[in-house]
Image (spheres, rainbow, N blue to C red):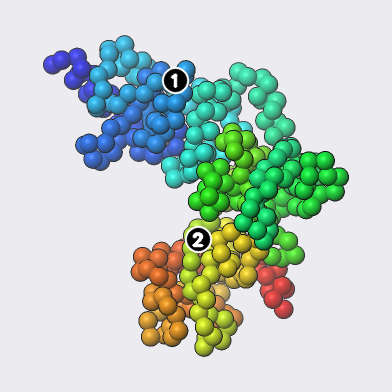
Amino acid sequence: MASWDRNTIILLDLVKQPENARCADCGAPVIFTSKLDPDWASYKLGVFVCLNCSGTHRDLTDVSRVKSIRLDNWEDDLVEFMRRNGNAVAKAQYEKSVPAFYYRPQQHDCVVLRDQWIRAKYARQEFTGKNGHLQKAYSSAGFCDGTLWKKGKNKRQFQKRRFVLSQDDFTLRYFIKEDSKVAKAIISVRNMNAVFQPEKVGHQNGLQITYMTEDRTRNLFVYHENGQEIVNWFNAVRAVRYAYLRKALAPANDSELMPLLTTRSLKEGYMEKTGPMQWEPFKRRWFVLCSVDRKLLYFKTPMDALELGAVFIGTEAHGFSVRETPTRGSRGSRWRYGLTMETPDRNFIFMCEQELEQRDWIKAFQQVIAQPLLPQHYSIEANMKRKKS
Ligand SMILES: [Zn+2]
């Protein structure tokens, strides 16, 4: 057997080991089911990575070099290097001191998050524990002062604004001008969320910051041209939220706090809805379903600053359920695929354009309804009721 063939077999054996079978950087499966898809390994770092992450490795020629396991030729010494290293060894070295609040991207996260994670790990070596100045920087990560492009409240344009995030009083402030003395807004991090929304914002570094103002959800849409900067802001929000929640929810442990630092919505998209009287015309609205706080929010468009309304979603035991709606029950809607959400107060009829969307929404609502109610949900529900009355 030629040594090339033998080496490919050794590598294919290595990549079947549990720690190597998933991408060292995002956890996606390394080996694809299709025989034609190449699978990748960095022979300079000794890690097995997925197709997407291999793209960033290819940009970092100083620290990483990738080859396809099955399509490229591997010399004996490189195979031996892969055997001695692998994803578990690399993780112990390059992820030795990742701060608790720091977001570790997953397979389906946006490009900028995955890209910057790989650069932070290998090119900047931020987490090896060897760069003292970086450790210090992370201990003060809850302070950030800089300029971001922010979408105007009722405008399409983005304008440069100065933002200051502070762990001292758990606030995010923004200023119209660089030298403004008075903040345009002082936002508590108590109910703050940050989530990357490149498609919505129309920029690969687009970030949505959400918070509560007078019991309504307010959205800010921002971006920074530089990927490292915007990921720093994102992790700074997580650092401040972590510090805040550690106090507010003491003695909660890290595994309870981590899912609360920043959260992704379970589902977003357009549906049609009527008002409380069901003969009212159907209107198209942008819906956002958050499973962590059990809220369905709706907006006129995806980039609105303020919600139009919100519905709390309880459990089945509290009278909440969701089901498909027959088409005949939906007079006046342009879209055909309906669902009815029953709540103790009223029934909501939502219409989707596509059958697939209808199924996804039903599944998402069922998932939230099936989750047990936690103590914090009672106060969310009480606040929403108070607002309505
Ligand atoms: Zn990956």
Question: Who is closer to the viewer here, 282 or 157?
Answer: 157
Residue 147 visible somewhere in the drawing: yes
Q: CA distance from mark 1 to mark 2?
A: 38 Å
In this view, the residue in front, 289 or 12, is 289
Quadrant of the rendered image containing residue 34: top left
Please state which amino acid type lies under the numbered disc 1. Thr
Pick out the residue farthest to the right. Answer: 181
> Residue 213: horizontal and vertical position, in percent?
73, 61
Mark 2, residue position? 268
Tally of numbered tags = 2
Q: Nearer the viewer, mark 1 or mark 2?
A: 1
Judge: label 2 CB < 8 Å from ligand 1: no
10 Å neighbourhood of mark 2: few (<14), some, or many (≥20)?
Answer: some
Under tag 2, what secondary structure? Answer: strand
- What residue appears at the point 70 percent right and 40 percent down from the top-left corner? 147
Kind of element beneath mark 1: loop
Q: Which residue is mark 1?
A: 61
Picture disc at residue 88: none
Q: Earlier in the sequence, mark 1 or mark 2?
A: 1
Q: State the image coordinates of residue 223 (x, y, percent, origin top left).
A: 61, 44
